[in-house]
Image (cartoon, rainbow, N blue to C red):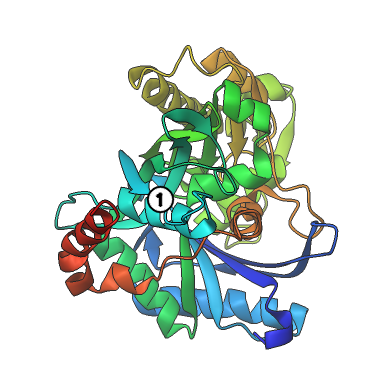
Amino acid sequence: MRESDSNVVLGLDVGTSKVCAVAGQRNKHGETRIIGVGLSSCKGIKRGVVVDIDSTVKSIREAVEQVKQMSNLDFEDVTISIPGGHASLMDSRGVIAVSREDREITEEDVNRVLQAARVVALPSDREIIDIIPQQYIVDGYDGIKDPVGMIGVRLEVEAKIITGNITSVENLLRSINKAGLKVKKIILEPLATAEVLLERDEKELGVALVDVGAGKTSVSIFKEGHLVDTYMLPVGGEHITNDIAQGFKISTQEAEQLKIKYGCAGVFCVREDDTVKLPSTGSGVQKDISRADLAYIMEARIQEILLMINKVITEAGYRDQLTSGMVLTGGGMAPIHGCVEYAEEILKMPVRADYPKIIGVASPIYSVATGVVEYVFKNAKLKAEPTEQVSNRNIRRNYFIDKLKEILSDFF
C-alpha cells in the first residue's frame, strides 16, 4: 500500500467455501467507505482449518487481486479474522504502578497494564492472539472504560485473553504470507462481526451472535457490553446443499443454485401446488418437482442446526440471559427465506438476520471481512501485536519471565 494511502485497511475472511477481502477507508467524518471488494471460492479450508495451503494461497490471491483492481492500490499488510470456535477465552488481571510523577495515567501505562495481563500460563499448543480489556480499576475504583488522563497510583485491568491453537494459526499465517501479504493483526471473528451488526444496547442486555457459514456455525455470547463466550458447531450451509443434492440426485453446484433461487426454511413458506424445475440432466430434460419437497429437505437440516444452537446456549447457562435474543448472519442460512420466523419458533426468543449496511458489502457473506475493517478503525489507538510471536516459540518460552521482571520493576 502506498504511504499516502496508509489510512486504508484490508480485512480478510478465509472461510470454508470462500475468501472475502474488503478494503475500507475512513473519511474526515469518521465514516467508513468501501473502496474494494474481492470474493473467491476456497477448497483448502475445512471447518476453519487449513488443509491445503496451495489451494488456500490461490484463493487469497484471487480475492486480493480483485480488491487491487477495484481500488487501484497495492497492499502489503492485512488484518485477518480467526473463527471463534478455534479460540479460547480466559480471564486475566494485570496491575502496574503509574509511571509519571504527577500520577497522570497515559497511553503507555494502559499498554503496560495490558501487557501485564498477558502474563499467564498456557498449554504448549496454544498462543495468545489478543487481549480484550473488560474494565480498568484506578486505586480501587472500578468500572472505568478508558483511564487515560485520570490521576492515580495503581492501575489494574480485568481482561479476556484470547488464545488460539498454534498449528491452525501458523498454517493460516503461512498461507497468507505465501500469498505475498504480511499479517498486521489477528482479530477474533465474533468481535469483528459485532462491530457492524450489534447495537450497543444488545451487547449490554445480552445477545447471541450466530454466524452460519458453509462448513461451520459460530455461536458467540455478548453480555454487559463484552464477549463472554464463543462456540463452534461443525455444521453449516453446505450441509443443507448436500442434503438437496442427495435428495434429488443432482450435483452440489446445481443443489446450491436450487437452494438460493427457490429454497426456504420450511414447508410453511410454500404452497402445496408450487413447482420448480430441476437443472437439466444429461439428456437435456428438465424435471418438475414440488417446491414443498425442497422445503421439506431443507427444513430438516435447518431445524437440526437451530436445535444445536439452542442446546449450546442452554447447556452453557445463557438461555435466560439473552434479553436481546439472537442475531443471525453469514451466507450459510441467513439469506434463506423464512429462516428468521423458523428460528423464533424453535428458539422461543427474538431473532433478526443482519448484514453490513455499507454500500458494496450489503450481504451476510461480507459480515466478517467488513467487521475486521471496522474493528481496526474503531480500535486504532491500540497497538497492534506483532504476529511474529505466533510463529516464534522461543519468544513464547521467555515471555513469562521477561514480563514478570518488568512488572516487579514497577514496584521496586
Asked which quadrant contains residue 373, the reply is: bottom right
| Label 1 sits on residue | 131
What residue is at 17 percent from the left and 67 percent from the top?
Answer: 398
Q: Residue at x 60, y 77 (%)?
A: 64
Observer-nearest of 223 and 54: 223
Q: Quadrant of the N terminus?
A: bottom right
For residue 230, above or below residue 361: above
Q: Is residue 291 at least partly visible in the picture?
A: yes
Residue type, numbered disc 1: Ile
Outermost residue, right direction?
29
Foreground residue, 350 or 105? 105
Residue positioned 49% across, 72% down in the render: 184
Q: How many marks?
A: 1
Element under disc 1: strand
The reply, left or right, for residue 351 in relation to residue 94 is right
Image vertical order of residue 317 relative to residue 173, above or below: above
Residue at the spot 53% in from the left edge and 55% down from the top edge: 106
Q: Going by the image, does 300 lie left or right of 162?
A: right
